Amino acid sequence: MSVLAAFRDSERAAPILERIRARNTGPVSLMEFCGGHTVAIFRSGIRSVMPGNVRMLSGPGCPVCVTSNADLDRAAALAKMPNVLLATYGDMLKVPGSKESLAEVKAQGYPVHIVYSTLDALRLAQEHPDKQVVFFAIGFETTAPAAAAAVLQARAQGLSNFSICSVMKLTIPGARALLDMGEVRVHGVIGPGHVSSIIGADAWRFLPEQYGLPVAISGFEPLDLLAAVDALLEMIEGGKPGLSNGYTRIVKAEGNRKAWGAVNAVFERGTATWRGFGEIPESGLLLREEYAAFDADRRFQPEVAASSEHPACRCGEVLRGVVEPPDCEVYGTVCTPDHPLGPCMVSSEGSCAAYFHFHQGAARPH
Amino acid sequence: MKHSHILLAHGSGGSMMHELIREVFLPAFDNPYLRRGNDQAVFDPPAGRIAFTTDSYVVQPLFFPGACIGDLAVHGTINDLAVGGAMPLGLSVGMIIEEGLEVDTLRRVVNAMRDAALTAGVPLVTGDTKVVERGSCDKLFINTSGVGVIRDGVNIDGASARPGDVVLLSGAIGAHGVAVLSERKGMHFATPVRSDSRPLHRLVAAMLDVSTQVHVMRDPTRGGVGTTLNEIAAQSAVGIEIDEAALPISAEVQGACDLLGLDPLFLANEGALLAIVPEQHAAAMLAAMRGREEGREACMIGRVTDSYPGIVRMRTGIGGTRVIPMLTGEVLPRIC
Amino acid sequence: MCLAVPARIIELRPDSMALVDIQGTQREVSLMVLDGDAAVGEYVLIHVGYAIEKIDEEEAARTLALFDELALHDESFGAPTPGDEA
């Protein structure tokens, strides 16, 4: 589709960059809450062309990274239960839990299957009627509809050997928790494009209205990100925090009511434990009582020894934007993508991994 | 062949092994060296320095769009000689066959090797076959070694890149990686992306005809252009800067990469080469490359600098800069 | 994990499934959570095997036009930025 390809057009970038450089805002920090944005920002080289007063921060937008070791250990325990076949998105495979990663569990001979979609997980259950397929559901609002759809389909098909272990989380409670902690000064927020396609652009009005923070919802192409930065700087410069939606080709004000309706029909909000934040109330998606039959935790009650984090791992602080990866003592030395101490270095959207892949050895921008 | 599948006895040195050689290998690889039936191929020493290389091929699956393990085994070793500035003289072939492999499959691979060797004009002059128990190898592993003669005046070395040199790429990248991975994942494209496996020794000869002052040449196989440039930057202790907009990547390869979350810079190529040459020879060399089918899309993708030695940087589409790292944490197994 | 790709619908299939073309490769995806009807030839955004939103070509063109307009009105900061609802 040629009109989409135009969002990668580098010639359109120059005028937006000029506007950004001409702004008069003083030092500002702009934070994104989306792992996809973390990667897109690095891949496009945007940081290297930002003026010196604009600092780009990464918030807890990577669902893999905010999954706690306790949750990872639970998934490993489920995989080891007799007759269980664990299905997981590939992103989770190499993340180290307290003791081991799912890749290591798989290497020990336990059935851990990588799936691209919950449709594949359902198919596994249909093809292995004698096995119990457990889908390890991670993700934010973009991914939640796929899990809801899977549960609805499993119920419609009367699948008795399918269940999910949900550690899915909600972006906005996480963002609120970070802002409320007040550890980091944020002047503007780049709003996650695909999360917003589900929950709607209007879901972010609380930022200007309750926090006085401008928010610009952005797509993932270099032009989208530049436009979002420019929109934020304009609102900061003018002292008028508001909501800007630059991703209107995908994001509607009200979002995708059907998808979000399915999520709310199947899941309810509950307390969830976030790496780096501890427990955040109303931030996790848990199966409603009506769908308890599909809850892997209730069905199998996996036993997990006390979980622990690696003592040298500072993922939590990285996720809160308090520490930039190169400032972590073990970054790039003991902790590398091949030998990660925590998820931020091994997740495809982790901050540490992004710094490592895209900044290795080069002069630090700020 | 009496049997439809390879048995252990086909590797035991007895009559069944002779049947295998006589009915599958010899008809395909027939040449004066093999016809002598000796354990070694004998050459008169050629004039000039000798290049010697070896490579083993364990790609899974054996067949994929555009090529198979046999093509890779012939082209890959020819290319390892070619990028040293050597004209290949001959290859050896060592096959390790898993008990139970279909004879038809073996024939297909062997015939592909025959065709590749004939087209390249490089004979397979000596070989060996072993059959191992089921489970001891994955269907078929092939080793090829090659001997070639290096032209006078050519001194290609990974440590020879110099600030001011330019980086040339002979053609579009990423196709082989996509071809193998898509086959492995059972992905079906409307227009299948085909492996770019091809011999490059004639392309290299055309380049050396322009000038023997090629500083570095390498074929970016496993790990892709990104890894190869990093290796060169480290060996030569120089910085390398490339331009994202200059990279030749087909729309189909880019689309497949978007879909699979892959970076074309790190995908294997089996029919492309990188050359680092003094700037004054670049234009003539590119013209010579473009004059051949293998170099039709040859282009300059960057320069060697003295800033950030050991680091490869890329100018992005929007004029930003990012570092191209060594490939880490993303292991794409058995791609060649 | 936010990885979502644009795809063109080639064929509608039973049980809310569809065959789509994603840059030359064809895959079967679910339309179960897509808001509204989808027709052959339309573009949708696919995430983990599900179509989650239709791609509004007109909006895309409008956004691009705004970028181009900004390039012309570089000096006047009073001009609206894309989608500003402040």
Image (cartoon, coloured by chain):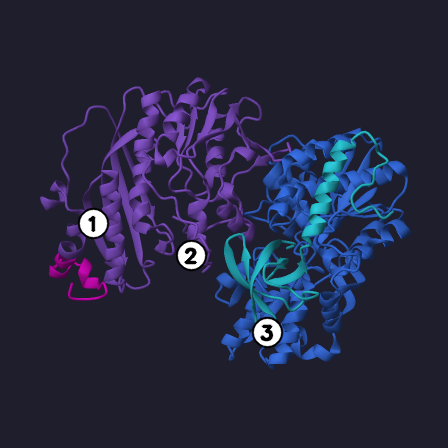
Q: CA distance from mark 3 to mark 2?
A: 28 Å
Image-based side of C13 in relation to A184, left or right: left
Disc 3 residue type?
A: Asp
Q: Which chain is purple?
A: B
Residue under the point 15% across and 57% down:
B23
Q: Is residue A266 above or below residue B283?
A: below
Q: Secondary structure at mark 3?
A: loop
Q: What stretch of residues is rendered in magenta?
A: B1-20
Q: Which chain is cyan?
A: C
* Labels 3 and 2 in the same subunit: no
Q: Among all residues in the image, which is located at the extreme left?
A: B36
Label 3 neighbour load within 10 Å: few <14, some 14-19, many 20+:
few
* Labels 1 and 2 in the same subunit: yes
Kindly identify which residue carries mark 3: C15
- In the rendered structure, are the residues bearing label 1 and label 3 in contact, judged by CB atoms less than 8 Å apart? no
Q: Is residue B303 above or below residue B25?
A: above
Label 2 neighbour load within 10 Å: few <14, some 14-19, many 20+:
some
Whether residue A175 appears in magenta in the rendering, the answer is no
* Colour of chain A as rendered: blue
Kindly identify which residue carries mark 2: B183
Q: Quadrant of residue C38?
A: bottom right
The residue mark sitting in front, 1 or 2, is 2
Image-based side of A261 in relation to C10, left or right: right
Kindly identify which residue carries mark 1: B128
Image-based side of A293 in relation to B217, left or right: right
Whether residue B15 appears in magenta in the rendering, the answer is yes
Disc 2 residue type?
A: Glu
Kindly identify which chain the residue marked by label 3 belongs to.
Answer: C
The picture places residue A359, in percent across and down from the top left corner, at 62, 36
Q: Quadrant of residue A306?
A: bottom right
The picture places residue A269, in percent across and down from the top left corner, at 78, 67
